[in-house]
Image (cartoon, grey):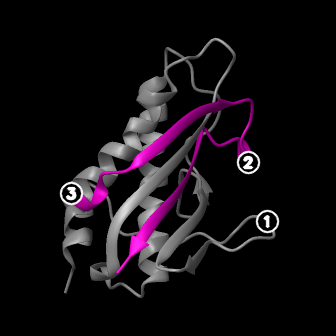
Amino acid sequence: MKNSIEKNLISLGFSLPTPSEPVGKYVSYIKENKLLFISGQLPVKNGKVVFKGKINNKNKDYGYKAAQLCAVNIIGQINSAINGNFNKISKCINLGGFVNSGNNFEDHPYVINGASDLIGNIFKIKGVHTRFAVGVSSLPLNASVELTSIFALK
């Protein structure tokens, strides 16, 4: 039986992904003191980065979609960390967004809104969070966006 989080994902055109393995010497998540820290998630689908390259003023909607996919992958990591029991989630505390962009791009918040909107639509009131959105000169595997998160557990 699908839980409400998975149903919400499906209603938005996504499915619950199998979490990707780390690409370096780190773990995908850590649970500590009723907090769940999720390592950086890239816009990966079926094991491949599907949103690559720099974001600029002409392709910021591409970046928005990349951030959405990063958020979907965060939900996949959460699912793994809590063994599918989303009732263990108290709320989203923070999203951290990194946008692969050039020096002249200034609309990082718009891009990371892709993740914020998705988390809000999926988790409803539990999805209200703090956030940062910054531009960087490059990201692993030439990804367009990377997203980290912290969730509170019950």
For label 3, count other residues whose C-alpha is less than 10 Å away and answer few (under 14), some (14-19) or many (20+): few
In contact (CB < 8 Å): disc 3 and disc 1: no
Mark closest to the chain's N terminus, 2 or 1: 1
- Dividing the image into 4 quarters, which one contains the C terminus? bottom left
Which residue, as the protein is rendered here, is positioned at the far top? 104
Residue beneath the point at 75% across and 71% down: 26
In the displayed structure, 27 sits above or below 149; it is below
Please give left or right for residue 36 compared with residue 135 in the image: left
Residue 21 is drawn in which quadrant? bottom right
* Marks 3 and 1, the one that precedes in the sequence: 1
The residue that label 2 is drawn on is 140
Instruction: From the top left corner, tell me how far across and down residue 47 is, in percent.
Output: 60, 63
Q: Residue 22 sits in which quadrant?
A: bottom right
**Magenta span covers which residues?**
125-154
Q: Earlier in the sequence, mark 2 or mark 3?
A: 3
Q: Residue at x 81, y 70 (%)?
A: 25
Residue 24 has which mark? 1
Say whether marks 2 and 3 touch (CB < 8 Å). no
- Between 83 and 66, the one lying in front of the other is 83
Inspect this view and state whether residue 18 appears. no
Q: Circle 3 is placed at which residue position?
A: 125
- Kindly give the residue lying farthest to the right in the view shown: 25
Residue in front for this viewpoint, 97 or 15: 97
Q: Residue at (49%, 73%) from the top-left corner?
A: 35
Q: Secondary structure at mark 3?
A: helix
Query: Secondary structure under badge 1?
Result: loop
How many numbered tags mark residues here?
3
**What whole-number distance in Å separates the C-alpha atoms at marks 3 and 1?**
34 Å
Label 1 is placed on what type of residue? Gly
> Disc 2, disc 1: CB below 8 Å?
yes
Q: Name the amino acid type tagged 3.
A: Ile
**In-image side of 71 versus 20 (left or right):** left
